[in-house]
Image: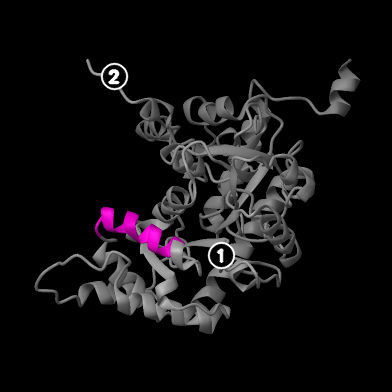
Amino acid sequence: MPNISIKGQTMPPSPIRKLVPYAEAAKKQGKKVYHLNIGQPDIETPKEVFDAMRNIDFKVLEYSHSAGIESYRKKLAENYKSKYRIDIDFSQLMITTGGSEALSFAMMSCMNPGDEIIIPEPFYANYNGFACAADVKIVPVTAVIETGFALPAISEFEKRITPGTKAILICNPNNPTGYLYSEEELIELKNLVIKYDLFLFVDEVYRDFCYDGRKHFSVLNIVGLEKNVVVIDSVSKRFSMCGARVGCIISRNAELMNTMLKFAQARLSPPTFGQVASEAALKVADNYFEAINAEYISRRNLLVDGLSKIEGVTCPNPGGAFYTIAKLPIDDSDKFCQWLLESFSFNNETIMLAPATGFYSTAGKGKQEVRIAYVLNKSDLNNAIQCLSEALKIYPGKTLSKSKASAIG
């Protein structure tokens, strides 16, 4: 039998989806499973999107331009300017098959095999896959739960810079932590990438999900980074259109955009139906986002308050996105998440969480942490919190608090 490629063998499986067979088995046993493991919003996709899809009158379903349908790119550029005060020309924007393809294009266009990219961990697990596909080495710098996963000290980044370092990647607001980077933190990164002549990739997919009066500050509004910054965006979460598979990549670096266009031409074009749907989504009024943010704030508050009442659980208050990383009194998050599906139920219900080990690059990190996506309605979320509370009471691998351990000793 022919051998599978080394790259195929080293490509990491999704830590978010690897427990799917256990969830399916639990459902076959009649258990209700609350999915807190994946960022699939239950928010309804805007009506305008489906109206546009129903009214398509194509005679031929043609390829679009490799960079995306021009009318959509122009309207999207106008939207960035009017809504976010980001002044870009449509030629500085390319439509991609989801944000995933955008980041893959960026890595392959900016970096050579063996080059290094520094990423604060925990980070979105699929960054590992994109880096593997591009033959790029991830160099992690660890953010800690005690600071709410704030940007690590710039000195920690600088320690990791080598002749092979070509880029830094952050997600703002962050998946999986929900941390919202401040303008001051971004300015610190600006000074670092200018000093060492690096690219700065910023995943801004969750830009519209910022809470408690805090505002998102885009790196595209930092003067002096025109040649260094690459921004990744997507309609998936903003308009609850994960299945459209439409994202975009933005850069004012003309040479880089021309390079990425060659990769875009090699895959021919982004999905036409998804682009039609995404263009229609730009007509959605701002009150759509106001209502969604209010709902997510309510869910976040319910989740954080509920988790904080469970003995031994630590959970920062996320400033954006719709995720949080929680630290649990457990021995191994991978084992715990599997146990929840295989061996536990409360009122014939259980929960599916994402082990945080898959969001770290450093071996051994995240063993006591899970990522929780608060994408369920509040009734289901409340039931899920109760399930977790009951599960932690009986989990065989529960760890004792220091005070209890001392008392027993």
Q: Nearer the viewer, residue 231 or 143?
A: 231
On the image, numbered disc 1 is attached to which residue? 227
- Image: magenta residue range: 256-268
| Res 204 visible | no
Q: Residues within 10 Å of mark 1 (few under 14, many from 20)?
A: some
Q: In the displayed structure, does residue 79 sit left or right of residue 245?
A: right
On the image, numbered disc 2 is attached to which residue? 3
Q: In the displayed structure, does residue 54 sit left or right of residue 186?
A: left
Q: Is residue 257 magenta?
A: yes
Q: Residue at x 30, y 65 (%)?
A: 274
Q: Is residue 20 magenta?
A: no
Q: Is residue 261 above or below residue 101?
A: below
Residue 240's quadrant in the figure?
Answer: bottom left
Considering the whole magenta stretch, tell me its main secondary structure.
helix
Q: Residue at x 72, y 64 (%)?
A: 187
Position of the N terminus, as image quadrant, is top left
Alpha carbon distance from label 1 to label 2 = 42 Å
Secondary structure of the residue carrying tag 1 is loop
